[in-house]
Amino acid sequence: MINTFDKITDQSYALAKKGDPLFGAVSISGAKNMVTKIMTACLLAKKGKLIIKNVPFISEVLITLRLFDQLGVKYKLNVDKTLEIEPQSFRSSKVKFEGEEGNRISLLLAGPVLAQFGEATIAKPKGCKIGLRKIDFHVQGLEKFGTQIKETDEFLFMKLGAQGLKGTQFRLPFPSVGATENLLITAVSAQGESIINNCAVEPEIIELVKFLQRAGVEITLNGDRSIKVRGAENINLSEFTVIPDRIETVSLAAAALATKGDVFLKNAKQDLIVTLLGLLEKMGAGIEIKENGIRIFYKQALKPISVTTEVYPGLATDFQQSLAILFSQVQGLSHIHETIFEKRFGYLEVLNPLIKNNKKFTISGQCPKGQECRFSGQGHQHFAEINGPIEFGAGEVAICDLRAGFALLTAGLLSDGLKISNLKLLFRGYEDPVAKLKSLGADIELKI
Ligand code: EPZ
């Protein structure tokens, strides 16, 4: 398989259309939302070399490495998907993004940079436009560690008091993934003990906890979503392996079922998608869990279903896009109640004009009856009704966010011919998605 992530330009597009059901075996790559966090945690080491294995070739990794360049961190990304990192001392306390480029990782560098310089100038995080994506929990948490923070539109200017980073207790108002990771990493550089309450416990965060534990940090995860960390002078670890990407697993599983296919997802892990597997089972999908992966296959007409996205172990918000396309192929009414991000159904609006059989995706600002969520009464378009089966005609769509990108590819495989542009967003988080679908027999072409 050729890795294309660094060749995608603004002009690149994919052409997809209805063909045979997806069939065959494909490998799941390393997890996007874990790799960059482990990369950042490596910066807590003051010497030596750390090797991260199973690094996905996606531009999210490149964007993060460009931040490392600014800090002067030495690294080598090898063809065997290992990334060698030599943190040493940073040469700069400032990180910024170039042009349109960006991700959420800049903010996670705050702790390691503050620990060395006592100050940091950090570009505000960018990323998919799927809601407000405020950073107030990060700011409040870092302030509790003893940081003074001033904000401009583009940057956070941070300065430590005379006592440096000091251990603290902070309760997250909501179990935010990024804020949990940020405060855990910062806590390692702080003096003494820190307790973070109401943490997110997504599998990628558990991996970060495991990384820190193996690197010699005293860290405990309690049943009440609290994590206790004892600050450490240094961390010491030679290598760590990235787990398979659960979001890619679900994206491919949904595409297989939507095309009435039969695929074996090599390396896919049951324990990362237990909630999702229960849901597919309920719909009537064929599932075979093996030591080295999971087979997902169409065996009978699928049943419609209503789902709600939640923090882990609930159904991930990153799964709903591929599921929406799967639901569109099922006879009857399915629903998705999105409770994590305010505006994550833009891709359905993009698809509506392409529908040729008098159906549509209906998106509303109301919570389903009796299931009020934290967006209740605020008018955010966070509830989708999908009345299947939907038939997609031909046309053009532009990807509006990463996970929507894969959903649009899948819609393309059910259409009379879809041109999908803005692929940079897609390749930020999926490793060779077009080549992987093609290897399963999809009628899809990548035009670079
Ligand atoms: C991470 O984003 C992931 N990104 C997202 O995946 C994922 O959808 C999300 O977690 C939820 O699981 C990465 O890991 C790089 P959050 P993050 O902080 O950390 C609110 C993908 O496609 N909030 O858990 O940014 C926030 O607005 C991406 O791979 C605040 O209000 O998500 C949201 O409503 C998309 N203030 C909720 O919390 C804050 O300071 C959850 O966000 C922080 C968050």
Image (cartoon, rainbow, N blue to C red):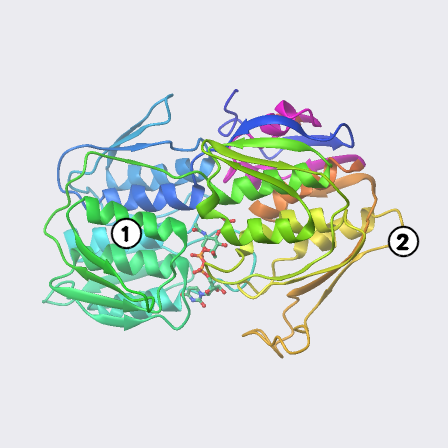
Of 158 and 203, which appears nearest the observer? Answer: 203
Local SS, label 2: loop
Q: Where in the figure is residue 385, as x and y percent of width and height?
A: 74, 62
Q: In the rendering, at what x and y percent does residue 119 appear? A: 20, 58
Mark carried by residue 181: none
**Placement of 132 over or under 260, stated as above or below:** below
In the rendered image, which residue does mark 1 sit on?
209
Query: Does 219 appear above or below 61?
Result: below
Mark 1 surroundings: few (<14), some (14-19) or many (≥20) residues within 10 A: many
- Marks 1 and 2: CB-CB under 8 Å? no
Identified by mark 1, the residue type is Val
What residue do we see at 63% from left, 49% from top? 280
Q: Is residue 240 above or below residue 361?
A: above
Name which residue lies at 32% across and 53% down: 108
* Residue 101 seen in this snapshot: no
* Residue that label 2 marks: 358
Q: Which residues are magenta?
A: 416-445
Q: Is mark 1 within 8 Å of ligand 1?
A: no
**Residue 3 highlighted magenta (yes or no):** no
Nearer to us: label 1 or label 2: 1
Query: Split into 4 quadrants, where in the image is the C terminus?
Result: top right
